[in-house]
Amino acid sequence: MESFLREWRQDALNKAQYDSAIFIGDKLLALTNDDNDAFWLAQVHFATGNYTRAQSFLSKQDLIARNPSCRYLAAHCYIKQSRFDEALSVLGERNPTHLIPNPANRRKAQHTNGRSTASHHGKSTARLRERRGEPSEEDVANRRFEAAMCFLRGICYAKQNAFDRAKECYKDAVRIDVQCFEAFQQLMKNSLMSPDEEWQFLESLDFDSITVPAGPGIPGSDPSASQEAAEFTRMLYTTRLSKYRNPESFTSACETLSTHYNLASNPDLRLAQADLLYTQCRYKDALAVTESVLQEDKYNFSIYPLHLACLYELRMKNVLFLVAHDLADNHPEEPCTWLAVGIYYFAIDKIAEARRYFSKASMMDAHFGPAWIGFAHTFAAEGEHDQAISAYSTAARLFMGTHLPQVFLGMQNHALNNMTLADEFLRTAYGLCKTDPLLLNEMGVVYYHQDRPAEAATLFARALEVADEIGADPTAWGLAARTNLAHAHRRARRHRDALDLFDEVLRLAGGRDPAVLAAKGLVFLELGQPADAVDVLHQALAVSPQDPVATELLNKALEETTGALSLD
């Protein structure tokens, strides 16, 4: 009878027929008084959103204290009601780090307490697993619930703005159970680790603990299938890491997942590929990928922040308007909707409106990084540097693993001519990410303004090298970096190197950049070649007749030319 009722309850739950599941589950619990049946009845109430009733079932017979699955569900009920202190009182504040597998014997697991409801065959299988040194199925299940409780602790601490403690809870959750993707996702989505930390953390994970059952009626696990599953999981996790480090490993993982596992068109994999393209400043290519995902799944909200960023970078204002309008009509409850509206207004220079909608998105989800960055950008756009610094500082505190808020803080202090502070923030950003060419370029600009042209030139050159290493689009920002490098060479009295670079920039830019032509004219003046300077400065004024710098330099060049002729 118990087996019949359990199958009936599970079938109703699978069909989302919750009244049936509650009706049958209640009768089953009366018959068996079993911990597992109490858990499942509470689970049905949880699925319907009736969290207090779920807790009442879990509170009976001391289930919360002695059963990990019931303790997990009780804490989850409190979290759903935003009662985080009470959730922590159920969970406890210490993570069970003794459950983290020992590197010396990674295939063995620690045992946790819990009731056994195994059949006779299950008991014989359990004895065989014990002789082999493998954990029992119940031990594995309890361990996974302990990892899930670490994840819930992290959620509670994050809601209380204790991000360091949240980060450690998430990390312990994945260390205890490498399949606790929820915790791994929180670490990646909220940028709680630097790119270096992310890769080190991945290497520390116990993928060997993943086991695949040998088959029906066969005790133990299948070593070959377990090894394949472990490598598959490692590759999936690799695609979630920062794209500023090890792009080769990311590309290799993507290729294997695409060719061997038919995941080439999988939205998560496509999002990871688009993220890499965006990191490389290849905005058109990234947009093509995000559009292909949205054609298949129009309201895949995980792709929208990147999709919107690409539209903004490509100045596609009309498309931004249509996307924002569609989202506002159909999904006003999503933070992404108001991010889209904010980005549209920011793109058309309606800064006050943009700020209002970025703020709305951040209030709907206090941990929505793009909204915080957009909110800070609105102050920077209006020259409100102090308020921009305050907003970027909030983003830096919320998303401690990403270097971008620190870069923006450095840029704001640079705008305020606080070069020492700008240098400090950019160095902090460099400590988090050493492979962002845009960061290296900003550091070079600060050194240039600190009258350190040789060091600035080194950083500009390194920015170009890194951009080439990661496959960045040179047209997106490479001209600016080359121009900066040429100016640094000029300030360092390396005039021939400066001229070569200015010529390269003019060739790439079509020869019609008045600022570069004026800078080239200045180099000729410093070399004592006023006639060549006059020719170049005439070209600059032909492009921009009112250019004040070119006009002043031309007058000086003409004076020197006249002086040289009179001496002759």
Image: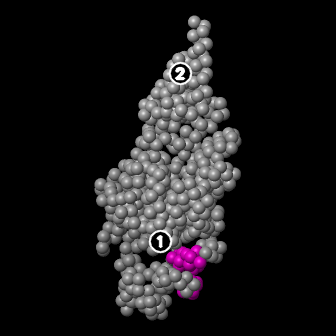
- Front position in the image: 268 or 9: 268
- Front position in the image: 201 or 108: 201
Residue ID at (60%, 63%) = 356
Question: In this figure, which residue is indicated by the disc labeled 1?
Answer: 329
Disc 2, SS? helix
Tally of marks: 2
Residue ID at (51%, 76%) = 69
Disc 1, SS? helix
**Residue 292 visible, this angle:** yes
Q: Residues within 10 Å of mark 1 (few under 14, many from 20)?
A: few
Tell me residue 439's x, y (percent).
55, 43
**Disc 2 and disc 1 in contact, CB within 8 angstroms:** no
Viewport quadrant of the C terminus: top right
Viewport quadrant of the N terminus: bottom left
Q: Residues within 10 Å of mark 2 (few under 14, many from 20)?
A: many
**Residue 396 visible, this angle:** no
In this rendering, position of residue 255 left or right of residue 410 = left
Q: Is residue 61 magenta?
A: yes
**Magenta region: which residues?**
54-81
Tell me residue 70's x, y (percent).
53, 79
Asked where in the image residue 82 lies, by quadrant, the reply is: bottom right
Q: Is residue 114 above or below residue 266?
A: below
Question: In this figure, which residue is indicated by the disc labeled 2?
Answer: 534
Distance from Cα at disc 2 to Cα at disc 1:
60 Å
- Front position in the image: 46 or 330: 330
Residue ID at (39%, 85%) = 12
Which label sits in the foreground, 2 or 1? 2
Tell me residue 342's x, y (percent).
54, 61
Main SS of the magenta part reads helix
